[in-house]
Image (cartoon, rainbow, N blue to C red):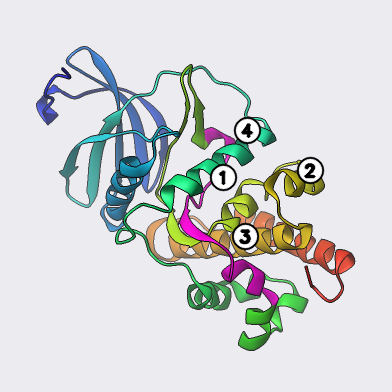
């Protein structure tokens, strides 16, 4: 039987990751290791989202949250620590995990997750419009809806929203996924667009393994990039005294390149 832990038992050992809106620490309590995460109070729903996903995911490991404490301006929560060794995540495994995650997470209670639909996308698009290439920037709402129809009419589930190799922990028994700070309910295809937006992976191989067309993947990368740009603009305007110039330029270039690839591949932008 697991020991009952209180906050007085928790002793932080070292910082694993830190940036202005969150801090992740390795902690010890009653002889066992745990992960202690502290986030800005505005993002407290991350805790409910992780609990909802933990409740339905069985094949994929999701850390259990044991304690939650509200502080002045922040919220801290204590999670199970997953012992692991750093291993390179191959594309085949990443695609398998994304697929398995969506299959299980679609059964999660939807209340903690914001719904990301075409209306939400239009708000993000308007907010970051100046960073986008002219061929995309000039589209009106009707044209955007037609252009991204395959994305927003696709299968829906919990979308992790911040997939990259560091969010996947490989253990002896199973793979685990961490960090649900940007998760939402929306088109599952966006997780593929997000994960492969900055990799050197072949789009052809990704599409073959994921069972999607290259046009769809490129459009998913564009939408995922716009979501990231909107996040940078929010942080810059409300939370972080940093201009994000380098990061915005990087994602603006990724979007521009994907638009160019898309136009070459399918001038009429059809799947």
Secondary structure at numbered mark 3: helix
Which residue is disc 1 drawn over? 99
Task: Please tell me the numbered disc located at residue 205.
Answer: 2
Which residue is disc 3 drawn over? 225
Mark before the other along the chain sequence, 3 or 4: 4
Residue 45 pos. (x, y %): 29, 55
Label 1 near label 4: C-beta < 8 Å?
no
Task: Please tell me the numbered disc located at residue 93.
Answer: 4
Residue 62 pos. (x, y %): 38, 35
| Magenta stretch: includes residue 222 | no
Which image quarter is the N terminus in?
top left
Task: Please tell me the numbered disc located at residue 112.
Answer: none
| Residue 198 visible to an observer of this rendering | no
Q: Relative to residue 22, is residue 131 depicted above or below?
A: below
Mark before the other along the chain sequence, 2 or 1: 1
Q: Between tags 2 and 3, which lies in front?
A: 2
Q: Which of 36 and 118 is in front in this view?
A: 118
């Amino acid at each position: 039987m697991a020991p009952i832990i209180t906050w007085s038992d928790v002793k932080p050992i070292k910082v694993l990751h830190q940036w202005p809106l969150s801090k992740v620490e390795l902690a010890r309590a009653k002889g066992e290791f745990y992960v202690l995460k502290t986030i800005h109070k505005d993002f407290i729903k991350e805790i409910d989202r992780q609990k909802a996903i933990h409740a339905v995911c069985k094949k994929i490991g999701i850390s259990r949250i044991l304690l939650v404490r509200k502080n002045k301006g922040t919220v801290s929560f204590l999670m199970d620590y997953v012992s692991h060794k750093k291993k390179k995540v191959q594309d085949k495994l990443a695609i398998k995990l994304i697929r398995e995650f969506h299959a299980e997470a679609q059964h999660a209670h939807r209340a903690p997750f914001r719904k990301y639909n075409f209306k939400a996308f239009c708000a993000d698009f308007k907010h970051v419009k100046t960073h986008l290439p002219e061929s995309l920037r000039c589209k009106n709402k009707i044209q955007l809806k037609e252009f991204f129809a395959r994305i927003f009419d696709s299968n829906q589930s919990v979308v992790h929203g911040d997939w990259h190799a560091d969010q996947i922990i490989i253990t002896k028994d199973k793979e685990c996924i961490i960090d649900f700070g940007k998760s939402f309910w929306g088109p599952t295809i966006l997780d593929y667009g997000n994960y492969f937006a900055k990799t050197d992976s072949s789009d052809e191989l990704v599409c073959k393994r994921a069972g999607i067309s290259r046009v769809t993947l490129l459009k998913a990368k564009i939408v995922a990039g716009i979501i990231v740009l909107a996040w940078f603009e929010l942080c810059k305007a409300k939370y972080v005294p940093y201009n994000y110039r380098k990061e915005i330029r990087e994602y603006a270039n990724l979007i521009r390149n994907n638009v160019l690839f898309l136009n070459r591949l399918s001038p009429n932008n059809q799947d």
